[in-house]
Image (cartoon, helix red, strand yellow):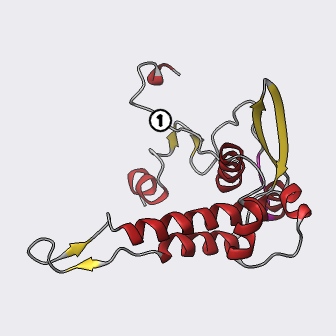
Amino acid sequence: MSDENTAIATGTSGPVGPQGEAGQAPPAKPGAVTVTSLDQLEKLVAAPIWCEFYLDRQLIRIECRRVGQGVDEQVRALRREAMPPFDSKRGPNGDYDFQNVGFLARRDANEKKARALLIYTGCPAVAAKCPGLTTPDKIHEFVRGLLSENILDLIASTVSIGGVDLVNRANFTLPGALEN
């Protein structure tokens, strides 16, 4: 196989590309952790994540954890559950009525249940106040009266994102991006 075909097959820019020798990882950025096994990655994923925000100018930190695939699937199912009604009179072939009041109410209620599920399963301090809840309805009833909407949103966002962020490889939209 020629160097050009090797580059195409391996996704590199040739036998030697910007990453160094073909098949080798690029140099690590300062502070980067190089993961060499699945066990090592699982240990990092199991570590706590922190929801941090200011409350009356005081930094508050709440320990949270990443949720697993089972909780993610429940959250997605709750969000998909409310479907808008199909109105055959809308347009030539009919269309879904996304402004239907009943649909909007069901969608908002399910979104709040999904948020409560994320908060309850991802924030041990919340779950410790009323352990053992298993259904989205019971979890929502418990969580909805705990804290302000803003704080609940911050906790849910922290758990949902899970402390994960993508490293930018190339950013052609910012003026100074190519200078790095």
Q: Main secondary structure of the magenta part?
A: loop
- Image quarter in which the N terminus is found: bottom left
**The residue under label 1 is which amino acid type?**
Ala
Name the residue beneath numbered marker 1.
170
Residue at x-position 68% and y-position 53%: 156
Answer left or right for 114 relative to 134.
Answer: left
Answer left or right for 35 relative to 63.
Answer: left
Answer left or right for 147 relative to 108.
Answer: right
- x, y percentage for residue 35? 77, 52
Instruction: Give the magenta range.
Output: 34-38
Residue at x-position 27% and y-position 79%: 86
Number of on-image labels: 1
Residue at x-position 43% and y-position 51%: 3
Which of the 4 quarters of the picture holds residue 90?
bottom left
Which of the 4 quarters of the picture holds residue 87?
bottom left
For residue 35: magenta? yes
Q: Residues within 10 Å of mark 1 (few under 14, many from 20)?
A: few
- x, y percentage for residue 180? 53, 22
142 versus 55 height, above or below: below
Answer left or right for 138 relative to 99.
Answer: right
17 versus 93 height, above or below: above
- x, y percentage for residue 8? 41, 55
- x, y percentage for residue 84? 35, 73
Nearest to the observer: residue 163 or residue 14: 163
Nearest to the observer: residue 115 or residue 48: 115
Nearest to the observer: residue 97 or residue 175: 97
Q: Tag 1, which secondary structure?
A: loop
For residue 132: magenta? no
